[in-house]
Image (cartoon, helix red, strand yellow):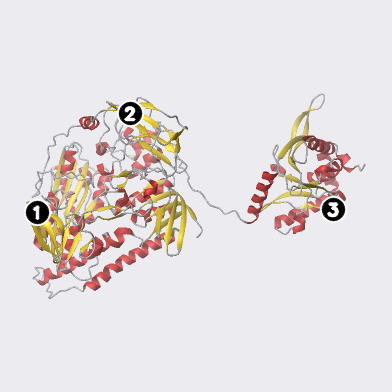
């Protein structure tokens, strides 16, 4: 016996080291020449390192995931000196004497064996042995003795994850029929990893991102890169607000729009921003200047067939709740139709994002740069709330808001949201000018 | 040019490549095929198809001559001759029609065909240089289907009078004296055809027999026929080199004596090898198996998502093997479970007479350790063969002695190539002798001999 050391070969141009990706062998395994000892991963490809000889693994250097340099020792093998080939030969079954029957009508059997045909026999298409450690034991059956089955049955078995070597054939000469495979499956004989009949879908569709979607992508990437966001989520009890809203909607004059929560929120924001003017602003980080606005121009994130758009309700501070609702409806429709004018899509100083019924529990909205705050509306849900003596069913809505942390401190943001909450929970205050 | 990116890049537009591309496109994979020359590969352009056209033309002329020399059928023909230019045009017409068909199939399948030589930069990127510039193609999967090329003889490079099969399919005149080096099927098919077209043909074979991959029981008929046709076959003879003093080949017999054979053309058909150079394959450093790319039973190479099909993967270099591999690779890439589990890759030799072989010959079956039965049936006892005036040959079946499962089927005779489909089907289905014997074979056809051979093997032949 002698030792063979397998080192990491030069696996490619300019590659100095590689990561061990797979280690199918372990110490003590017998391997054949050509069996994979391990595979390594480089930037370019995964390369399998085959065993140069038959032998027993005595030592494995690196572990999976380890980076190894070209030339490092990977595996040591105990190799029989020149005995490998002989060993294999003695394992092979001795050819049986084969009495030939019948040579018919003028066709004499030729005696001389010239050479076995190599091209057209089943042996030529014999599958390669799997790259596994070879357990000691009898040699594999010769290829010609593989299960007797029609191509369609072989395909069916492969799809179902059945190894035909384990299926007993009921046909003539032990031929495996489709029914035999099905019976084998019904009896639970299957490889569970393969038996579900599902196939991998390896398709990848290439879609060029163009137009509005590209603008959105660029803008959001730039926003997230430049603005350190922080998000704040608070729960708002909107039971009273919802009662008011229902009442107002039921008794509204004809010609007035149906009110959603948003116009109430817009008016509440107008009032809250009076106390927290720092949030109604645009920050030009190029010139490091913050522009605080007197007017409240509220951007409203709207889903359109082409993607997200943000039309702006200008001067919400100068609009009644009905006016806000009407403008909201008009702008939303214009955006969806693609008819919104440029000036209707720019100039907001703070933004509301709402997914309505899809509003979820909480979200982390992305600021509509260069603003410094965005208020996200989550869905309203009836929840049990402890009210001093008992649980009461209350309509609860979360506000999930994000702020530009360069400009807005957590304290200020929280104050703003708490003010907003106070207004929304006692909605009469929204209409009390101080 | 803008880089193209796709799921499957097929390098080579031969049968393995274009079939792989069509199947991949059928399965919804975005597929690009790169080919520098004509689509259809060796087979369609300079192999199977033009050679069979030439063989047919030669046979027709030969037939006309035979009839002119006195026909027992009662047809009288005088002074037949051939317009070789027209023959070649007819042959080229067939090739271009089929080639057009391949173009159409690829176009309809929505496959992008890039014209030029594709050079792989790594396992995912290929640069195609063409007249219109350099095109980069990035692919998730690369299928190498670059085919094979004729092997030249050392000391006898192609050029001048020394030609490969490609040129021998397009001689503009019938050579007076043609020497064929190599007694394999390509050399014998072409040698026989040119003999029938009027050339003086000598076959020089280094071994002690022709068609070494078939047993002598099959090849005996071909040898006899070559003799009748006047093709000289020199066995155990080695081509040494060109004789510069005149157009002639120097050969050396096994006794060491050198001989000079005058020749106008010398056709070298000593084998084909995987075409590996010029595609950047060295960059990939794929594991090789002899002179071919090593593949497993799914046509995977040693590099992930790099596949190889057809002649570039070595013997047997046959169109139908490449097609089966190409189809399979596309399906595996699309996520289906496949492996190359064919029982047989049948082979046909379009010599005179034809040879077809699927599976084990009797000798091969015995050396594989089987106890066997063999049944044969001659065409001399077949009515159809007689009416075709072609009763030279036989059908032979090899089966296991213990359970009658058929191991191999062979035939030699005129038009027996058409029996190959039935042979392959029987073997793939795992047929027993009883299955073949119990199947009605149409009368009067050559295929009746298949059933009769099965009956003979079972010990109760009806017409034997």
Q: Nearer the viewer, mark 3 or mark 1?
A: 1
- According to the image, label 1 marks what residue? B253
Q: Nearer the viewer, mark 2 or mark 3?
A: 2
- Report whether mark 2 lies on the same chain as mark 3: yes
- According to the image, label 2 marks what residue? A77
Asked whether disc 3 touches disc 1, contact meaning CB atoms under 8 Å apart, the reply is no
> Residue B371 has which mark?
none
On-image quarter of the N terminus of chain A: top left
Q: Position of residue B19 (x, y in %)?
A: 37, 54
Q: Is residue B351 visible?
A: no
Q: Nearer the viewer, residue B257 or A234?
A: B257
Q: Position of residue A232 (x, y in %)?
A: 74, 36
On-image quarter of the C terminus of chain A: top right
Query: Under tag 3, what secondary structure?
Result: loop
Marks 1 and 2, Cα distance to the nearest angstrom? 49 Å
Q: Nearer the viewer, residue A197 or A432?
A: A432
Please tell me how many numbered marks the rendered image carries.
Answer: 3
Q: Compared with residue B56, is residue A404 higher up or lower down, i.e. above or below?
A: above
- Which is more N-terminal, label 3 or label 2? 2
Is A332 on the left-hand or right-hand side of B266?
Answer: right
Is B204 on the left-hand or right-hand side of A3?
Answer: left
Q: Is residue A172 visible?
A: yes
Quarter of the image for residue A390 reads top right
Q: Residue furthest bottom?
A: B78
Q: Position of residue A345 (x, y in %)?
A: 75, 55
Marks 3 and 1, Cα distance to the nearest angstrom? 114 Å
Q: Position of residue A51 (x, y in %)?
A: 33, 34
- According to the image, label 3 marks what residue? A254
User: Local crowd at mark 1 within 10 Å, few (<14), some, or many (≥20)?
Assistant: some
């Amino acid at each position: 016996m002698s030792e063979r050391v397998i080192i990491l070969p030069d696996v490619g141009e300019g590659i100095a080291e590689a990561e061990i990706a797979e280690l199918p062998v372990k110490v003590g395994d017998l391997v054949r020449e050509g069996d994979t000892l391990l595979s390594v991963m480089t930037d370019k490809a995964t390369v399998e390192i085959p065993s140069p000889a038959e032998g027993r693994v005595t030592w494995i250097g690196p572990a999976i995931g380890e980076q190894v340099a070209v030339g490092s020792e990977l595996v040591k093998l105990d190799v029989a000196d020149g005995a490998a080939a002989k060993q294999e030969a003695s394992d092979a079954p001795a050819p049986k004497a084969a009495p030939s029957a019948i040579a018919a009508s003028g066709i004499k059997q030729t005696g001389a064996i010239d050479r076995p045909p190599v091209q057209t026999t089943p042996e030529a298409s014999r599958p390669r042995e799997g790259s596994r450690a070879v357990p000691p034991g009898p040699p594999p059956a010769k290829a010609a003795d593989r299960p007797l089955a029609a191509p369609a049955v072989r395909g069916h078995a492969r799809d179902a994850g059945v190894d035909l070597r384990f299926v007993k054939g009921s046909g003539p000469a032990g031929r495996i029929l489709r029914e035999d495979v099905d019976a084998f499956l019904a009896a639970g004989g299957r490889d569970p990893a393969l038996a579900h009949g599902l196939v991998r879908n390896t398709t990848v569709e290439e879609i060029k991102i163009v137009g509005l979607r590209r603008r959105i992508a660029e803008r959001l990437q730039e926003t997230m890169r430049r603005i350190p966001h922080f998000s704040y989520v608070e729960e708002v009890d909107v039971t009273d607000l919802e009662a008011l809203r229902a009442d107002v909607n039921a008794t509204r004059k004809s010609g007035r729009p149906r009110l959603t929560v948003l116009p109430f929120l817009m008016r509440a924001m107008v009032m809250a921003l009076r106390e927290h003017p720092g949030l109604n602003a645009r920050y030009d980080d190029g010139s490091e200047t913050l522009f605080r606005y007197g007017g409240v121009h509220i951007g409203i994130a709207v889903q359109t067939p082409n993607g997200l758009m943000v039309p702006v309700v200008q001067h919400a501070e100068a609009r009644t709740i009905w006016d806000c609702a009407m403008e909201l409806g008009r702008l939303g429709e214009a955006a969806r139709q693609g008819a919104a004018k440029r000036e209707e899509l720019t100039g907001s100083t703070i933004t509301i994002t709402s997914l309505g019924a899809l509003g979820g529990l909480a979200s982390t909205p992305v600021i509509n740069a260069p603003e410094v705050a965005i208020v996200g509306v989550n869905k309203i849900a009836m929840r049990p709330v402890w009210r001093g003596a008992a649980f009461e069913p209350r309509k609860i809505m979360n506000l999930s808001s994000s702020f530009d942390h360069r400009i807005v401190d957590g304290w200020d943001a929280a104050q703003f949201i708490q003010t907003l909450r106070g207004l929304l929970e006692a909605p009469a205050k929204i209409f009390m000018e101080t | 040019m803008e880089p193209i990116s796709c799921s499957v890049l097929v390098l080579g537009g031969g049968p393995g490549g274009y079939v792989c591309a069509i199947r991949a496109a059928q399965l919804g994979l975005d597929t690009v095929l790169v080919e520098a020359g004509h689509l259809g590969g060796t087979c369609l352009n300079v192999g199977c198809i033009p050679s069979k056209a030439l063989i047919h033309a030669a046979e027709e002329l030969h037939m006309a001559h035979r009839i002119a020399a006195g026909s027992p059928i009662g047809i009288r023909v005088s002074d037949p001759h051939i317009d070789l230019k027209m023959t070649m045009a007819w042959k080229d017409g067939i090739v271009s029609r089929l080639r057009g068909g391949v173009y159409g199939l690829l176009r309809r399948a929505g496959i992008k065909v890039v014209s030029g030589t594709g050079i792989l930069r790594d396992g995912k990127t290929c640069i195609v240089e063409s007249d219109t510039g350099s095109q980069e193609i990035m692919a998730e999967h690369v299928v190498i289907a670059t085919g094979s090329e004729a092997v030249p003889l050392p000391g006898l490079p192609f050029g001048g009078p020394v030609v490969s099969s490609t040129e021998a399919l397009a001689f503009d005149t019938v050579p007076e004296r043609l020497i064929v080096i190599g007694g394999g099927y390509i050399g014998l098919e072409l040698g026989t055809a040119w003999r029938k077209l009027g050339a003086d043909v000598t076959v020089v074979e280094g071994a002690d027999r022709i068609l070494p991959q078939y047993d002598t029981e099959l090849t005996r008929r071909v040898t006899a026929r070559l003799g009748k046709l006047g093709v000289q076959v020199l066995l155990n003879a080695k081509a040494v080199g060109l004789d510069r003093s005149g157009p002639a080949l120097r050969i050396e017999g096994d006794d060491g004596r050198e001989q000079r054979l005058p020749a106008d053309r010398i056709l070298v058909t000593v084998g084909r090898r995987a075409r590996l150079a010029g595609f950047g394959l060295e960059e990939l450093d794929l594991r090789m198996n002899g002179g071919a790319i090593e593949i497993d039973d799914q046509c995977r190479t040693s590099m992930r998502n790099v596949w190889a099909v057809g002649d570039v993967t070595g013997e047997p270099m046959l169109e139908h093997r490449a097609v089966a591999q190409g189809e399979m690779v596309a399906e595996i890439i699309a996520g289906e479970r496949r492996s190359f589990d064919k029982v047989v890759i049948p082979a046909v030799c379009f010599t005179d007479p034809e040879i077809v072989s699927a599976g084990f010959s009797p000798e091969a079956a015995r050396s594989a350790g089987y106890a066997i039965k063999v049944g044969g049936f001659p065409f001399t006892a077949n009515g159809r063969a007689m009416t075709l005036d072609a009763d030279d040959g036989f059908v032979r079946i090899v089966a296991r002695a213990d359970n009658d499962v058929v191991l191999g089927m062979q035939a030699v005779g005129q038009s027996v190539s058409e029996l190959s489909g039935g042979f392959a089907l029987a073997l793939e289905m795992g047929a027993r002798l009883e299955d073949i014997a119990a199947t009605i074979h149409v009368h009067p056809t050559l295929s009746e001999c298949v059933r009769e051979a099965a009956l003979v093997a079972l010990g109760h032949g009806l017409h034997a």
